[in-house]
Image (cartoon, rainbow, N blue to C red):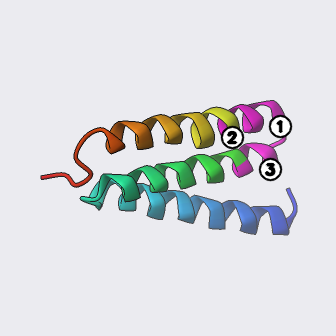
Amino acid sequence: MSSTLIVITLISLFFLIVAGIYAIVKKDLLQAVIATGLISLVLSILFFILQAPDVALTEAAIGIALSTIIFVLAIRNTKRFED
């Protein structure tokens, strides 16, 4: 891998860790779901960098779109904030 790809990969891994910690710590469930959507987006980019475009497209479709929509609909029908 070139040095540019290594830097992009390291920055992406940093964002993964930060978004994961943010999703765990937040008491607002909607913000936690948005953080998990961000995790799926970064993973999709990492899969594309690692030359797995089919896995990247699947992660984008399922992880970002479908899962986030299902979680938001579930939160809409329940309480938004965790006790």
Mark 3, residues whose alpha carbon is within 10 Å: few (<14), some, or many (≥20)? some
Which residue is more in the foreground, 35 or 50?
Answer: 35
Name which residue type carries label 1: Pro
Residue in view at x 42 percent, y 38 percent: 73
Q: Nearer the viewer, mark 3 or mark 2?
A: 2
As measured in the structure, the alpha-carbon distance from the residue carrying label 1 to the one carrying label 2 is 10 Å
Relative to 21, residue 59 above or below: above
Name which residue type carries label 2: Ala
Residue 3, x across and y down, in percent: 83, 68
Q: Is residue 63 left or right of residue 45?
A: left
Residue 16, x across and y down, in percent: 53, 57
Residue in view at x 76 percent, y 36 percent: 57
Q: Which mark is residue 60?
A: 2
**Of pointers 3 and 2, the one earlier in the residue sequence:** 3
- Mark 1–mark 3 CB contact (< 8 Å): no
Mark 1, residues whose alpha carbon is within 10 Å: few (<14), some, or many (≥20)? some
Dot 2 falls on a residue whose secondary structure is helix
Magenta stretch secondary structure, dominant: helix
Mark 2, residues whose alpha carbon is within 10 Å: few (<14), some, or many (≥20)? some
Q: Which mark is residue 49?
A: 3
Residue bearing the label numbered 1: 53
**Of pointers 1 and 2, the one earlier in the residue sequence:** 1
Name which residue type carries label 3: Ile
Q: Quadrant of the N terminus?
A: bottom right
Relative to 58, residue 83 above or below: below
Which residue is more in the foreground, 34 or 6?
Answer: 34
- Magenta segment: does it hold 54? yes
